[in-house]
Image: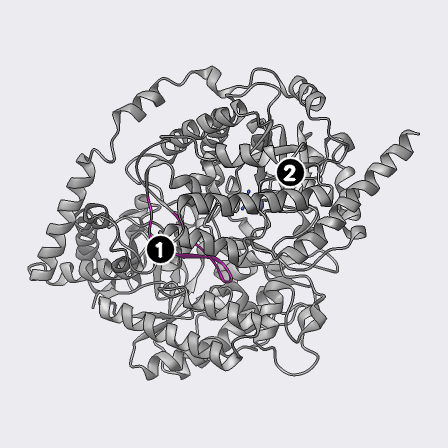
Amino acid sequence: MVVAHSLGFPRIGKDRELKKALESYWKGELDEAGLQAVGRELRAAHWQLQAEAGLDLLPVGDFAWYDGVLAHSLMFGVIPERFRPASGKPGLDTLFAMARGVSKSCCGGGAQAQEMTKWFDTNYHYLVPEFTAEQQFELSWEQLFEEVDEALALGHRVKPVVIGPLTYLWLGKVRGGEAFDRLELLERLLPLYGQLFERLAGQGVEWVQIDEPILALDLPQAWKNAFERGYNLLQRAPLKKLVATYFGGLEDNLGLAAGLPVDGLHIDLVRAPEQFPLILDWLPAYKVLSLGVVNGRNVWACDLERTLALLREAHARLGERLWVAPSCSLLHSPVDLAREQHLDEELRSWLAFAVQKCEEVAVLKQALLQPDAAVVQAALDRSRRVQASRAASSRIHRPDVQARLQAIQPSDYRRASAFASRIEQQREQLKLPPFPTTTIGSFPQTAAIRLARQAYRQGKLSAGDYTEAMQTEIRHAVSIQEQLGLDVLVHGEAERNDMVEYFAEQLEGYAFTRFGWVQSYGSRCVKPAIIYGDLSRPAPMTVDWIRYAQQQTSKVMKGMLTGPVTMLMWSFPREDVSREVQARQLALAIRDEVCDLEAAGIRIVQIDEAAFREGLPLRRAQWQGYLDWAVNAFRLCSSGVGDRTQIHTHMCYSEFNDVIESIAAMDADVITIETSRSQMELLEAFRAFDYPNDIGPGVYDIHSPRVPDVGEMVALLEKAAERIPAERLWVNPDCGLKTRGWPETEAALVNMVAAARQLRGRLAGAAA
Ligand code: GLN
Ligand code: ZN
């Protein structure tokens, strides 16, 4: 039988129930039994939804308390020394300590959280496993087995999902002790998979899904060899194995992936359609081929007719060995479109969320087996109408925007003078001390702020009262920054729900959901806006707020914008035009805003490009193409101002070593970057490449409530000063402070300013 299945379902819940439960638990308002109950209800509801949608085989193991990779670390006993409970098995508090660096009962709260980084090229973050040379593995977490029983008891046919051994090792990092190759751990790790599979088989499981997305990356030869070796050893496990690949094409790993001694292979035909029918030449005749044809990472309804044509061909060749699925786990897609009744009908008809994607998969399968069924015909008719209405819609295709794009000149991508001359002029007018201190933009989003914004949105607070409330917040933020002695102030971003949505709401061509949340990390969810048409800025977006903030202080106020690449990366993009074109449309809109801020007397404008690096294609061969248009988009939005206006940019969670030249090519006067969690590791990039402009390497991690002391920050700055000349160093946190509380924020900033002063003192001492 052709099988309709999914690789994973969003775990957060339609109403972000998981987020709410986690946060109550962390606050001590919900006990562990209560938290477990929420998890159980969510899993049951999600299986039910998928079963009702018509899927045959449901994923188990896609639920996780904070992150799925972290769950694997617990399952394999990969628990760094500093989190290991003094006695007994690790518990939920061990897990949360590893994720957050603090916990109710473990380790005295003094241990630093594990590093967090992007899951491939998505906006989901996983916790990086930490390995040591002595690493031992042991099965030490029962969650997966319990959840399998739970699903079976509910009468579902299930397929546990695990991260494959090679991908798991690849995602980890060696920490502490001597450097060694983590691939050497494979032999030690594999027996755990053996045990895992034995136990699952014992529970009555027929198929297991083993995620090996690294097969879509450029892999070193040793890792390719390890795939063969590793899977040969797992061959005897008493259940059927489906190796899942996604986020890209297998390319040079195609033969390797197809030939692994397993029972099935999943490939992503949304990202890499060219893999079909090529794959058929490689796949052994006994294997199942799962085709990922419904995009798990975007919100557009599937073009059923086109997809069906492909599936028919596959079905003719594969028969019962064909499985149908979304391209990847639906973790990256919002939960249920049915809740978005406020969207107009036309727009809604263009979309599909996780639940609808499951339905699409099911109907595609049904269309293969019962092409004449009424439901199939109805779905195909509807899909045809949707495609036609999008192709012709004047809401999407705007001649004025397209004309402006045509009129861009090469000079629009260049500042008037080179950096060396600009920075002189800027220094003269800004008169900042050495090691200037600043923050990344946002200050704590307190309950009061969120309530005011909500009341305003619901019409319970008038525009005037809302403006006044936000102005009060601005005055508060300004006065605290003045007291702290910061040099370049910010207005605090109280009026912004989200750094992308705030701008998107003021642009034409964007649409918004009410419940379209997607997990970003832990309990943090984002609600990406949807780019559905050509983009333009009808009016200034931030000028009134920033001007007001500047009026409250004689210090320099930095205007705060989100850059075109980040706007694009953190939105659901169109699929009918290239990302490059969408970035250029965004760049023109932001350019107008930058110029308006300058005209309003703002002397520093920060254009955040937090997502710049995550836009990098997974395969190196595609990097340059991306970097070219991404850098150009930034230059286009930032080059409309005079030399004396200082352009900052900010990036977080980034490893720049590979792209440092492009970062330099963006030609921002100052860049602030994430570094503290990785102990300034990032600055390695600056050894080989002489980054020419000013830099603020983050000196403390804002993702944790921990307050670092002065010495710690001084040490990090000293480390930075080994690479970057003191006169080009700025002092700032890692990222915005919106998720923090005021007390820890103030405490940390007091220390940060003190650290900057110490360095200034030393500099003055050295000069004397
Ligand atoms: N200016 C934004 C803030 O401070 C930047 C956030 C980010 O880089 N993710 O919140
Ligand atoms: Zn950031």
Ligand 2 is in which quadrant of the figure?
top right
Q: Which residue is mark 1?
A: 516
Q: Is residue 81 left or right of residue 277?
A: right
Quadrant of image for the N terminus: bottom left
Q: Residues within 10 Å of mark 2 (few under 14, many from 20)?
A: many
Left-right relation of 737 to 585: right
Q: Residue at x 43, y 75 (%)?
A: 38
Residue 514 lies within the magenta run: yes
Q: Amino acid at mark 1?
A: Gly
Question: How far from the left and from the top, in percent, is residue 248?
Answer: 40, 48
Q: In the rendered view, how is the structure colored? A: one colour
The range drawn in magenta is 511-528
Q: Which mark is residue 740?
A: none
Give the camera-side residue of 269 and 631.
Answer: 631
**Distance from mark 2 CB to nearest ligand 1 atom below 8 Å:** no
Regarding residue 527, the answer to whether it shows in the image is no
Q: Badge 1: how crowded within 10 Å, few (<14), some, or many (20+)?
A: many
CA distance separating discs 1 and 2: 33 Å
User: In the rendered structure, does residue 593 fall within the stretch colored magenta?
Assistant: no
**Foreground pick, 14 / 593:** 593
Q: Nearer the viewer, residue 325 or 474?
A: 474
Residue 310 picture location, percent across and down: 21, 49
For residue 489, the mark is: 2
* Residue 41 location (% of width, % of height): 38, 76
Is residue 448 placed above or below 728 in the rendered structure?
Answer: below
Residue shown at the point (46%, 67%) measured from the top left: 20
Horizontally, residue 650 falls left or right of residue 346, namely: right
Q: Determine whether the residue tagged by mark 1 lies in a helix, strand or loop.
A: loop
The numbered mark, 1 or 2, whose residue comes first in the sequence reads: 2
Q: Amino acid at mark 2?
A: Leu
Task: From this view, report whether residue 543 is shown above or below residue 414.
Answer: below
